[in-house]
Image (tube, rainbow, N blue to C red):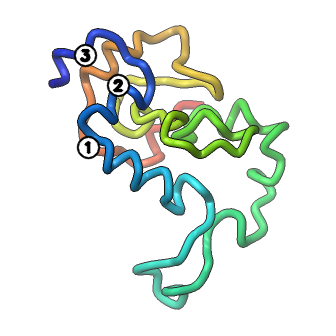
Amino acid sequence: MRNTIKEYDGAGTCIVCHQQAGEDFVTSIHNTWIGTAEYIDGKNGTQTGKLTGVNDFCIGVSSNEALCGNCHAGYGLLENDFSIEQIDCLICHAPDYKKTASGPDPSINATDAARNVGQPMTIMHCKQ
């Protein structure tokens, strides 16, 4: 399937085959910044996430958008739009991909990156 990708069109390219994965991610704590903790010692069943604690980096999303947008798996930060269309799957799944807050970094070929996807990588690959 990867070799049949003609053009990367954000999540639209991926959800053709991975609709459920997209829906699962959209509602995840990772994307929405709040949810019910599972598998976290001492927090199971409680509300947790970036919105429940003091987070002095993300609290200033407007002033930090450029930095947040380099790694965050979505484009809708300022609009609080966490819809499936706003997911950027490649930020975690394509090793040579770079992005901005509003789309793929113009210095890379996003379609080539989409053809080279794999299992999710850790946030440590984030390029600042």
Q: Quadrant of residue 16?
A: top left
Q: Residues within 10 Å of mark 1 (few under 14, many from 20)?
A: few
Residue at 48%, 41% (x, y): give it. 84
SS label for mark 1:
loop
- Location of mark 1 (residue): 119
SS label for mark 3:
loop
The tag earlier along the polypeptide, 3 or 2, is 3
Report the quarter where the C terminus lies: top right
- Relative image position of residue 36 (x, y in whole percent): 54, 76
In this rendering, position of residue 52 left or right of residue 106: right
The tag earlier along the polypeptide, 3 or 1, is 3
Pointers 3 and 2 in contact (CB under 8 A)?
yes
Q: Disc 3 and disc 1: Cα gap in Å?
A: 18 Å
Residue type at mark 1 is: Gln
SS label for mark 2:
helix
In this rendering, position of residue 59 left or right of residue 68: right
Q: Can you tell which mark lies on residue 5?
A: 3
Q: Nearer the viewer, residue 112 or 126?
A: 112
How many marks the image carries: the answer is: 3
**Which circle, 2 or 1, is nearer the viewer?**
2
In this rendering, position of residue 43 left or right of residue 66: left
Report the quarter where the N terminus lies: top left
Residue at 47%, 87% (x, y): give it. 41
Residue type at mark 3 is: Ile
Q: Nearer the viewer, residue 87 or 127?
A: 87
Q: Can you tell which mark lies on residue 13?
A: 2
